[in-house]
Image (cartoon, rainbow, N blue to C red):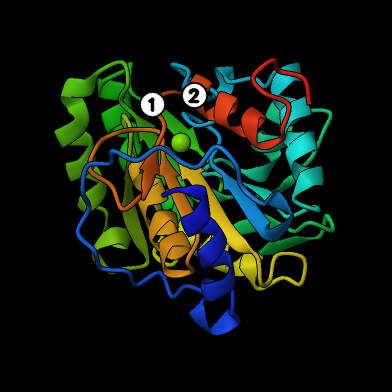
């Protein structure tokens, strides 16, 4: 996409009726296009995945921390977007706040199940019962005990199994999750990610988070720009595409995204460039 194309899309696609249903059905393809070096941020809503997009993935999710340069970059972007910036993650919002402390950003956690809007108000979708998640934890405990290098992450309303230390267990993990009665009966579904699989409520998706944000007055009518790195971001890529927005994958692999960047460093450089400050790290 070139900048002229983007400017044209701003005019043609920004009307509410063109905003996305998330139903784009173009087959995923490998991506050769880099995102435009300039964007009219005052007309955009910027949605950013965190792990693998803004910050390198760590062996353990709890090891991930933010840095001063990232915080300053996010603050500057938020200002340029007139507040229409949100972090979109499978993590809990409380965990995102730990990473961006002392700053807090509008955010969606748990794949859209929990959300904090731009005014700082928290909005929660219907969450699964604690008993349902406790049953899932109990069912997965024998597998985690048998393979201590599997990391069982309890997110209160979802349970993730990380197999980064033991990739050969991917099949066993996915089979265990698929076999859960709560997955079999459709109350929960399996969400695949990089070296992680988790069971989450069936309705949860990052597209859901985008739709909820874009329905807010501060975001409404803007062009969604979504950046993410994982399978979990594909629904959001599709949603942004259907809304005439821009989707950027931190990967060249097959994806619904329309543009790509190769690394976390490339994402930060691109975002810094959008602020008009070049790549020197200063806004
Ligand atoms: Mg990610």
Label 1 environment density (alpha carbons within 10 Å; few <14, some 14–19, many ≥20): some
Secondary structure at badge 1 equals loop
Identify the residue under disc 1: 262
Q: Position of residue 245 (x, y in %)?
A: 50, 60
On the image, which quarter does residue 10 sit in?
bottom right
Q: Vertical placement of 271 versus 217: above or below? A: above
Residue nearest the observer in this picture, 103 or 192: 103
Q: Position of residue 220 (x, y in %)?
A: 68, 71
Identify the residue under disc 2: 266
Quarter of the image with the C terminus is top right
Q: Residue at x 70, y 65 (%)?
A: 219
- Left/right placement of residue 32 relative to residue 122 reads left
Residue nearest the observer in this picture, 271 or 86: 271
Residue nearest the observer in this picture, 113 or 209: 209
On the image, which quarter does residue 149 sit in?
top left
Label 2 environment density (alpha carbons within 10 Å; few <14, some 14–19, many ≥20): some
Is the shortest distance between ligand 1 and the CB of mark 1 under 8 Å? no
The answer to whether one can see residue 58 in this image is yes
Q: Residue at x 19, y 26 (%)?
A: 169
Residue nearest the observer in this picture, 275 or 146: 275
Q: Tell me, yes or no, whether the two marked residues, 1 and 2, touch with CB atoms within 8 Å.
A: yes
On the image, which quarter does residue 50 sit in?
top right
Secondary structure at badge 2 equals helix
The answer to whether one can see residue 138 in this image is no
Q: How far apart, in angstroms, are the residues tagged by discs 1 and 2? A: 6 Å
């Amino acid at each position: 996409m070139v900048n002229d194309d983007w400017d044209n899309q701003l005019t043609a696609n920004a009307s509410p009726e063109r905003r996305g249903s998330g139903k784009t059905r173009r087959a995923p393809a490998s991506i050769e296009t880099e995102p435009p070096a300039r964007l009219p941020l005052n007309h955009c809503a910027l949605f950013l995945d965190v792990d693998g997009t803004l910050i390198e993935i760590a062996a353990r999710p709890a090891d991930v921390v933010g840095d001063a340069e990232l915080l300053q970059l996010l603050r500057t972007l938020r200002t340029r977007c007139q507040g229409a910036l949100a972090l979109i993650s499978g993590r809990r919002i409380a965990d995102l706040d730990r990473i961006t402390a002392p700053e807090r950003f509008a955010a969606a956690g748990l794949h859209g199940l929990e959300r904090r809007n731009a005014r700082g108000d928290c909005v929660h979708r219907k969450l699964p019962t604690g008993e349902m998640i406790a049953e899932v934890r109990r069912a997965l405990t024998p597998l985690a005990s048998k393979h201590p290098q599997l990391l069982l992450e309890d997110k209160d309303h979802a349970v993730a199994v990380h197999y980064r230390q033991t990739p050969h267990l991917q099949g066993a993990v996915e089979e265990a999750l698929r076999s859960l009665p709560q997955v079999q009966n459709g109350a929960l579904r399996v969400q695949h990610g990089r070296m992680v699989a988790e069971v989450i409520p069936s309705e949860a998706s990052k597209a859901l988070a985008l739709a909820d944000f874009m329905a807010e007055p501060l975001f409404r009518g803007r062009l969604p720009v979504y950046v993410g790195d994982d399978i979990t971001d594909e629904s959001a890529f599709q949603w942004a595409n259907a809304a005439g927005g821009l989707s950027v994958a931190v990967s060249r692999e097959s994806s619904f995204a329309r543009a790509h960047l190769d690394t976390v460093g490339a994402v930060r450089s691109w975002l810094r460039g959008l602020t008009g400050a070049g790549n020197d790290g200063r806004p």
